[in-house]
Amino acid sequence: MQSDYKLIRPNLTSYQKDILYCPERFTVCEASTKVGKTYSHLWWIFEEAHKPPKEGANYWWVAPVYSQAKIAFTRMRRTIAGKPGYRINESDLFIVTPKKATIWFKSAEKPDNLYGEDVHAVVFDEFTRAREEAWIALRSTLTATKGKCKFIGNVRGKNNWGYRLGVKARSGEPGYKHFKLTAYDAVDAGILSLDEVEQARRDLPDKAFRQLYLGDALDEDANPFGHEFIKSAIRPLSKNPTASYGVDLAKSHDWTVVIGLDINGQVTEFHRWQSDWGQTTKRIIDLIKQKPAYIDSTGVGNPIVEEITRSCPRAEGFVFTSNSKQQIMEGLANSIQKGEIYILADMVDELESFEFIYSKSGVKYSAPDGMHDDIVCALALANHRKGKRAFSAKAV
């Protein structure tokens, strides 16, 4: 960037240029992970904010949650560090250009907060993970200015508004253009290595690879269990003795959940509460007694588990890592799909919202931002303990 504000365009791939400089007002890019969509679209919104005659106008980068918006803000801030004429606000996440245009980095968590402004251009990052209400609000901000919006994100199945928006763009809706980018497009462009993509194909479940790297919208989105399998697994509470327990300890705003299974995999007990560690420890000890159990001992859970195991000799701690969580979640999915475990109707919502998402370390299994996965984790732990076969029906 020079002092006369002349922009120097970075090197972009042909597919990045096709998307950024598409004449259509709305572009919908459903893409593989790590194909350069964030980098290129940060440049686009930055470039838009320097075009006359839009001095003093607002430009928005919108992400599903605050932490994602801050990541994008930080990347742009680093790029312009030391350049004259820019004002950076760290607390409110905005950058004022030398021509007094403002680039805001916003969260879509509360769509009502997106109404009111007139915005000249928007990038809606990871739009498939945000609520449709956020897009409705954003659309209103672009009405007076007739501004553009670029949607970028990973595919997350077919049962969501983001997929429907992609269908709309693919069908030739006036003003819309659809783009699909796979990992192999990024290989051809020199952004990813073929070896890395092929290693990911070998490392990941086929469903995860197809959605994250090939951009295939599967019928059952990113849920590892399968919606139809979840519904078919619903049973009433079993009256049989408990054969194994799974315990997920509360973290921050979460809930402590204890789930018991009988030897046939049917739920015998389901407890969910919030209280201090002392009361929680006593209650878990009273429930488990001499029965086999796996208890989440990750982080703050470790000293709690040590105290519980002194009174409950068949209880064991289980540390969640990316690998161990993937292992027991795939085990739970396998058990649900084979009819080896059954659930209560009260557990359905959390199981259906659970998903796999891409992280730097590979595939991360968790609830969407702002939701809980306590029930899923406790159920997976109980199922894993049951599968250990370290006890017999006679012993319990």
Image (tube, grey):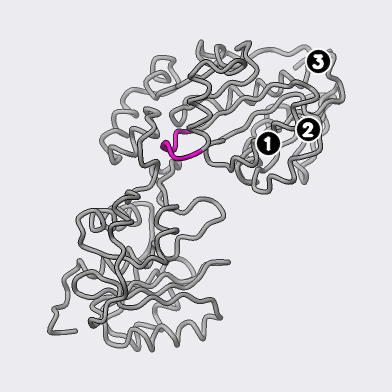
**Quarter the N terminus occupies:** top right
**Image quadrant assignment for residue 24:** top right
Classify mark 1: helix, strand or loop. Answer: helix
Out of 21 and 81, give the one closest to the viewer.
21
Marks 3 and 1, how far apart in space?
20 Å
Q: Look at mark 2 in the image and give the residue it sits on.
A: 95
Q: Amino acid at mark 3?
A: Tyr
Query: Which numbered dot is residue 150?
Result: none
Asked if marks 2 and 1 touch (Cβ < 8 Å), the reply is yes
Where residue 48 appears, x then y in whole percent?
73, 19
Out of 99 and 60, give the one closest to the viewer.
60
**What residue is at 71 percent from the left and 23 percent from the top?**
46
**What residue is at 48 percent from the left and 82 percent from the top?**
280
Q: Is residue 241 magenta?
A: no
Q: Amino acid at mark 2?
A: Ile
Q: Is residue 155 magenta?
A: yes
Which stretch did the figure color magenta?
154-160
